[in-house]
Amino acid sequence: MPRVSRSFASLLLRFWRGLRQWCGDADYESYLGARRHRPDLRRGTAPLSREEFYLEQLNRRYSRLSRCC
Amino acid sequence: MSVPAISKASHRERALRRAAKAFAWVAVALAGASALAAIAWHRGEPLNSGWFVVAAICCYLVAYRLYSAFVSAKVLALDDTRATPAERLEDGRDFVPTNKWVLFGHHFAAIAGPGPLVGPTLAAQFGYLPGTLWLIVGAAFGGCVQDFIILFCSIRRDGKSLGEMAREEVSRRGGFIAQLAVLAILVILLGVVALVIVNALKASPWATFTLAMTIPIAILLGVYLRFLRPGRVLEASLLGVAMVLFVVVAGQWVAASASWARVFTLSGVTLAFALIAYGFAASALPVWLLLAPRDYLSAFIKAGAIFSLAAGILIVRPHMLMPPLTRFIDGNGPVFAGKIFPFCFITIACGAVSGFHALISSGTTPKMILRESHARFIGYGAMLMESFVGVMAMVAACAMTPGVYFAINSPPAIVGSTPEAVSRTISSWGYALAPQTLPALAQAVGEHTLFNRAGGAPSLAVGMAQIFSNTIGGDRLLGIWYHFAIMFEALFILTVLDAGTRVGRFMVQELGGRVWKPFGRTGWMPGILLSSAIIVGAWGYFLYQGVVDPLGGINSLWPLFGISNQLLAAVALVLATTVLLKMGRIRWIWVTLAPMAWLVIVTMTASYQKIFDPSPRVGFLAFANSLAAQIGAGTIPASRIADTRRLIFNNRLDAAVTAILAAMILVLVVEALLQWYGILARRRSVTLHEAPYLATQWPEGFAGTAQGDD
């Protein structure tokens, strides 16, 4: 039983992570993660705050076709 | 002695496993073929929709397992050792290596709009058979292949757009045609989807109130996400979904109150101007305030409604009351005029083959893909899923009685304007409809009337409401389910409208900036206002002409939309064919050449008929000429002459737009043929503009750097 509940909990956790990535909730963490493991990205620039990143992301996303007919 | 024994046993086990697998796939193929045969040849008693679900799912599984595997391995030779743009150019913003299931969700949410719901609903006037077959076959051999190969091309070119790739690989003219096609499709698309909303909301206080309330809800979410909890999309969206569901229920109280109902009972023309004003505001306002939060809301409700519809169909398994083929395959259909060939294939674009998808496949998705092999699952697989949405829409439309379907979707100029006249006309076609049936249905769903609601959205909403209410709540909840379905359709049509208007604004600014530099600056307010006005004015004009068209507007605008969408698909497939030729895959060229040839034939035939057909209901020029003759003969009252002259102008304009689209297809095909001849005759140097090969540094099990939790 504990094994079943463990795999169920892991399934739920993966679903939760996937949902956050799908809807954009996790975008800021991804951005910080990319900066952490790519030294070239952080050279000479401070990371954007969550608010700055959110606005920049929206402006970029909605300046090209992102929704189809 | 024991080693060979073990090896023999494991060999036998492997062979058995292979045989079991082969047997399972043969069983799936046989189940799909049997279900398709039942759909095609069944006559008499209404067919259960379970056959459609089985046929579609089995065909998709076989197509994915065999055809997409063949395209991946033989035609494209996908290479997982090659670093994708998400690895080489990772920046945490655009280029983000993403788990393939998450990216599948992203890609599907981006490609699935109102098209796969509205197109099949309109094409149901031919019966369920032609549309269903086209949805399944068109997707497997056309739409999925297009999406998959364009995604592959873009991955190999650092995520370049369709226009950039067409310019580099085909010719400068090919790239220019692609850009023009994108602008043309955008304007026509926005006009036609806005018309679908107008026809769903006119004279409906409940639906109008519900949709109007989504605007303050979106603004509230925008402020929440901007100032209170920046970027916390999930919690804000769930809050917004709860509020939207509340206003769906609250709409009935508004409709029941005489004074409030008056405020929200609007005519088609008033709604058209309201939408035009909304489009302008959404394009000019900051994106965080209205556009983005509405998109978040729409994505959640879209996903929820599509899964609910699938579950509802599986649980209820309604019977298909529409016959497999109706008498309207002869071209005299009341919903839109035109024979089954080519108009069935123009009406159902999204769900089978949609050129617009090529813009998404060469947009965000190629920048986020982890491995080349994921392109098969995401490009081919997501399109199969969209095709399934189209099949479900077909089931929902064909599960209602044909009389009701035609009464909702036919304009009064054809069926009359009183319940008795509508009932008489539709019954004379062989589809029984009592005069009181539709008024009673309208009352059951909380509407004043369901007559003259061309556009597909209301009939789809009735179909969905019947399926949902048979699952939960029974007739008591029919009104709530109907308005939930209308809100779901209208909400994501509005999302297409505001996102499309904004992108159209950027395109206009880019073009204008070539003439006068300051106009091209995206932050310059006069430029923003003027370009927003230009793009909104362009689609607003098509919307207005659709609203005042006595034949319902959909009859002229939806084919125009289908033609422009398939033009873009032809551009995409020309590009794909050219790339395959340059890669030396001449043997497999038919994979893209066959769907391209089919689309060119369909599009050119439809364009010719829309311009020159002698029937006034089909040909734009014939309709304009017949109206001009009526003015000449003095049969039009003096008070209506100005309106009639405007109709004449609109039809001639539609004929000119169709001719321009057809000319673009011809130029593109000639351009491509010359290019291919040059390559095959070795008269041109073959240069593939792929990014150079770089081996991936990621380990085999790597699933992306995108973070999922705090």
Image (cartoon, rainbow, N blue to C red):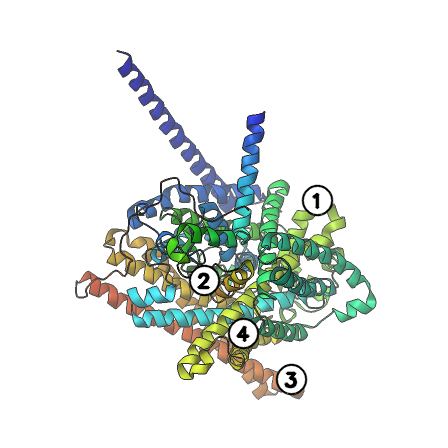
Vertical position of residue B511 compared to residue B85: above or below: below
In front of the other: B604 or B371: B371
In the image, is B457 to the left or to the right of B111?
right
Q: Foreground mark, 3 or 4?
A: 4
Q: Which amino acid does label 1 sit on?
A: Ile
Q: Which amino acid does label 4 sit on?
A: Trp
Which residue in the structure is indicated by mark 2?
Answer: B356
From the top left corner, tell me how far across and down residue B705 is, in percent: 44, 48
Displayed quadrant of residue B294 = bottom right
Q: Is mark 2 on a helix, strand or loop?
A: loop
Which residue in the structure is indicated by mark 3?
Answer: B640
Residues at marks 2 and 1, CA–CA distance in whole angstroms: 36 Å
Residues at marks 3 and 2, CA–CA distance in whole angstroms: 39 Å
Which residue in the structure is indicated by mark 1?
Answer: B472
Subunit bearing disc 4: B
Q: What residue type is labelled 3?
A: Arg
Subunit bearing disc 2: B
Residues at marks 1 and 3, CA–CA distance in whole angstroms: 49 Å
Which residue in the structure is indicated by mark 4?
Answer: B539
Which sits earlier in the primary sequence, circle 3 or circle 4? 4
Residue B652 disc label: none
Which sits earlier in the primary sequence, circle 3 or circle 2? 2
User: What residue is rendered at 57% in x and 74% in y?
Assistant: B284
